[in-house]
Amino acid sequence: MGQNLARQSRVCGSTIFVSLTAVLIFSTSLSAQSPDLATAREAAQQTTQSLTNPQAPGSIAGKVIDQSGVAISAAKITLSRGEPSIAQEIFTDENGQFAFAVVPPGPFHLTISSPELTPQTFDDTLQPGQTYTLPLVMLTVAAQVTEVRVTLSPQEQAELEAKDEEKQRVFGIIPNFYVSYVPNPAPLTRKLKFQMALKSATDPFTLGGVGVLAGIEQATNKWKQYGQGAQGYGKRYGASYADVAAGTFIGNAILPVVFKQDPRYFYKGKGSKRSRLLHAIAGTFVARSDNGNWGPNYSNVLGSVAAGGISNLYYPSHRRGIGLVFSTAAIRLGEITAASLFEEFLGPKLTSNVPPHSDGQP
């Protein structure tokens, strides 16, 4: 009886052993014949590992190519996780491939870059034990931005500014050429100084204004020696226009060229009213040189005196003398000061065609 039981046990054991061996051989052969089944089993093993070890490291790999599909070697791959200081850098091999073998699970940020190419970035989360493979990374040629700066010479800039100034008119009618509203204006050239003087002296409003003044003098019989009628009016017109022309050319062209000074008024526009008031009054006696420095306004003062001296040539003989010279000069300097005050406080509001970039201090 005991021998029979022992014999049956050995038979059962042999049967079980043979059965297990057969199952093992069968599963091995299935694995060899079915890669999908092997992959599934490997994934299952990884899943089991991740469940048993949530901190199991994974890996990140990929390949970098250019627009033509050629692998990019030596492209820099930067892996960042969490803190910016925690970063790893590697470079692609000659086949454009890269791999981070041991990467802790969690969110990650990849930056792929290569000289002269537009970088690519990827953000994702690595699972415990995961083998993460990026899709094919393509870097394209970086867009090139060409910046072209056109720099005008001081002479060209001065010509453009002078053209703008020759369009300035108070109420759209009265010439307002000799004021600069722009910051850091270019100095006027010799040619521009004479050109601006000629334009001012021959402007229709100037010619008409002299005609009105001569008519008033005719009506009030000023300068009786000139007489009445057309001849008297012509003499008065000639004398008044000579004052204007002489003062304009001597004070705004000839002497500014000789002393290398700028005949324009430079609008301040900022600061307290007192500082602007002083700036306007000082403009009659202080001038800006062509080199940007400030000094005595010889052009204004000597030009006014010279214009008064020239008036001795055509005014009635009983009016000639030193008194006429200095009274004419004083009147002209007073007119310049009044014009400067007007320019500083009312000019931009009443003048048409003021440049749009004129809100700064020169």
Image (cartoon, helix red, strand yellow):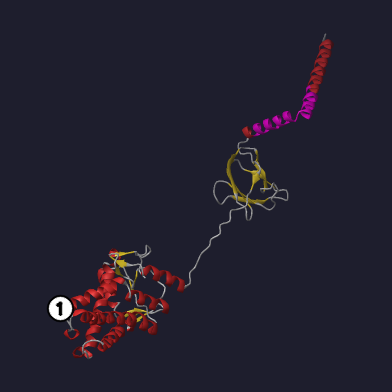
Query: Which region shows up in magenta?
Result: 23-49
The answer, for residue 340, to whether it is visible in the render is no
- Relative image position of residue 327 (x, y in whole percent): 22, 85
Q: Which residue lies furthest to the top in this view?
A: 1
Where 95 sits versus 172, above or below?
above
Which quadrant of the rendered structure holds the C terminus? bottom left
Which quadrant of the rendered structure holds the N terminus? top right
Task: From the viewer's side, name the closer residue of 259 and 170.
Answer: 170
Question: Looking at the magenta stretch, what is its main secondary structure?
Answer: helix
- Relative image position of residue 352 (x, y in whole percent): 32, 64
Where 310 sits versus 334, above or below?
below
Tag 1 residue: 220
Task: From the viewer's side, name the closer residue of 51 and 360.
Answer: 360
Task: Indicate left or right for 288 with 213 as reference.
Answer: right
- Relative image position of residue 151 (x, y in whole percent): 49, 68
Q: What is the secondary structure assignment of the residue under circle 1?
A: loop
